[in-house]
Image: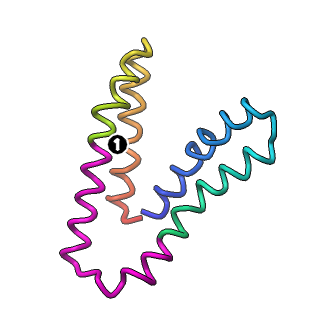
Amino acid sequence: MAAAIAVHNIPEGVVVAAPVFAATGSRAAALALAAASGLSEPVGALVALTVARPLATEARIAYVLAVAGGVMAAVCAADLLPHGLRCAAPRRLAAGVAAGAAAMGWTLWVGV
């Protein structure tokens, strides 16, 4: 899971930094905002460990993960997939979906 999060932070940083750099021309501002975006997850994890740890039971964690997975699935189905279909490159879309599914499946199979 940590490897998947780390790999996903690379394009996320680019997605955050590119518009900032395009709008301001400032590499420092783009880098700072991309770093803040990337660091928000580990900082949130530390806060959750210190604040929510006493409340974390196996059942509650399962429910929270199910809700997060449902939200991500809904975002993919309602927003990302329609945008991808409009890009007039259905083979690239299918290849990207297949590559992402294969990468996540591999991490689950290997136990990363």
Residue 18 is one of the magenta-drawn residues: no
Front position in the image: 5 or 107: 5
Up the image or down, 97 lies above or below 64; here it is above
Q: Residue furthest top?
A: 88
* Rendering coords of residue 92 (x, y %): 44, 22
Q: Residue furthest left?
A: 59
- Left/right of residue 18 with respect to residue 105 in the rendered view: right
Magenta span: 45-73
Up the image or down, 81 lies above or below 33; here it is above
Residue at position x 37%, y 34% in the image:
97
Q: Quadrant of the N terminus?
A: bottom left
Residue at position x 27%, y 40% in the image:
74
Callout 1: few (<14), some (14-19), or many (20+) C-alpha neighbours within 10 Å?
Answer: few
* Rendering coords of residue 70 (x, y %): 24, 50
Up the image or down, 24 lies above or below 52; here it is above
Residue at position x 45%, y 84% in the image:
50
* Rendering coords of residue 96 (x, y %): 42, 31
Residue 60 is one of the magenta-drawn residues: yes
Residue at position x 34%, y 42% in the image:
101
Q: Residue furthest bottom?
A: 54
- Write down the residue under mark 1: 101
Classify residue 30 by image quadrant: top right
* Rendering coords of residue 71 (x, y %): 29, 48
Q: Quadrant of the C terminus?
A: bottom left
Q: Main secondary structure of the magenta part?
A: helix
Classify residue 59 by image quadrant: bottom left
